[in-house]
Amino acid sequence: MATELLLVTNTPGMVEALAGYNGIQPFPAPGLARVRSLVVSEQPPPVVYLEDTRGTVAELWDIIHAAQAHGVRVLVGLQSIGIVHASDFADAGLAVTTLREPEALAGWIAQQLGAARRIAARQVTIAVGGAKGGIGKSLVVSALAEGMHRRGLRVLVVDGDLSNSGLVPEFRIPTGFGSFLTLRQEGRGHTQFTPANIARLIYHHAPSGIDFLLGADEAALAADFTLPDWRALMQAIGSLGETLEQDYDVVLIDTGPDMKKRPYALEAARNGGWVVLPSPPGRKERAGVGIALQQFAAHQPDLTDRCLLVLMEPERGVTVGLRHVAPLFSQHWPKARIVGTLPRDPHLVSLANEEADRYVSPLDVGRFRPFSLAVHDLVDTICTVIGLTPPQPRPTASLFRRLFPGKPGITPLQAAAQTGAS
Ligand SMILES: Nc1ncnc2c1ncn2[C@@H]1O[C@H](COP(=O)(O)OP(=O)(O)OP(=O)(O)O)[C@@H](O)[C@H]1O
Ligand SMILES: [Mg+2]
């Protein structure tokens, strides 16, 4: 849980600067009288940062004494009248600083509170959501994870479908590897959700180079896993940089179909992340996308501008086309952006899935098929929209493609076989 910090300051930019640290929840105080009444109230804040820019020395001492009598920790910032009395404050056992810059002050406060710098400031969360099952959420998660990893981005996939993982079979992850459900312990709050404990649960998927945090677990009951548990998990994931040598660039979350019970996509958007909504054109599916978007629109503030729609090409035989529904989506949800289209390629997906005894990505089975090219396009567009710069360029049409222009699905291996080379 974050430490509530009552801020009595005239230094501009303190709240923003403190946002760069984990576990601090700053509240700017309106006036000194209000501060005093809060400090002596039934539920005082645990910590007050008190600056001499906001009152006389006598007024400061009055609040300090009240705070000390009520077990409230006081941090003192001296910038003006208080400086000459600095030793008095220090002698009273108070933590005192004369720093003035908001960044430096925030750093000092964080140090006093033992709060670590949010190294994950750059770590972007993207949840893939939807109000309906079977619309391609897990497929989009796998495709984006693969596509982003190929661009040199460090990807952690979190499986938020706690009852029926689509990712475990897709990536052929062996059963029995621990899931984050095991971190939840009866009656012990959220003490187990630490970056160190989570780092131990990360599954390194060697064939793809993608890391996973698994959800569904036969040994643990998903029903017991509450929203506060999820929040504690996400907060600890945000601080993984404290434990790991390198941060993740992207945390991709797969979600289950029960958006009301497990509003993990909404949580991601609320916390500054993004939501990808696979959007098939059929009437019922469209309604599902609408229900999902309503959840974001109903939030204060409206979070539909955090929503990115991926138009999913329908199965053969579905009469309504994407060209027809794209304007409908844009009309109803002007702030949600359409970031691309995913062609339907059951042949490619099943070729990859049926590969004898190992995992292969559809992106490798058919490097230049429209599906794979569309995934790379999606990664490009999403990265641009969310302000992420992939370290590596997108894979370009290789020599093989130029050699075999008529065979869009061909891979170098197949090409080698066709030319008789070994
Ligand atoms: N563009 C596509 N090309 C080929 N197959 C697709 C495509 N989109 C979805 N599918 C297939 O549709 C099925 C359902 O997709 P997926 O499991 O990703 O949906 P989901 O939304 O995660 O479902 P659930 O709500 O059950 O978790 C899968 O077999 C998937 O391979
Ligand atoms: Mg799924």
Image (cartoon, helix red, strand yellow):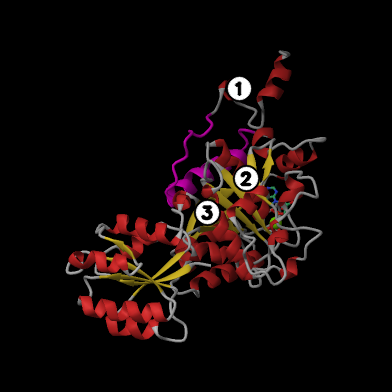
Q: Which residue is mark 2?
A: 143
- Of residue 339 and residue 171, the one placed in the foreground of this image is 171
Residue 36, compared with residue 404, is above or below; it is below
Local packing at callout 3 (Cα closer than 10 Å; few below 14, some 14-19, many 20+) is: many
Q: Are marks 1 and 2 in contact (CB under 8 Å)?
A: no
Local packing at callout 2 (Cα closer than 10 Å; few below 14, some 14-19, many 20+) is: many
Number of the front mark, 3 or 2: 3
Q: Earlier in the sequence, mark 1 or mark 2?
A: 2
Q: What residue type is disc 2 on?
A: Ala
- Of residue 17 and residue 47, the one placed in the foreground of this image is 47
Q: Secondary structure at mark 1?
A: helix
Residue 260 coordinates in the image, percent (x, y): 64, 72
| Label annotation for residue 296 | none
Ligand 2 positioned in quadrant: bottom right
Q: Which residue is mark 3?
A: 239
Quick check: 69 left or right of 282? left
Number of the front mark, 3 or 1: 3
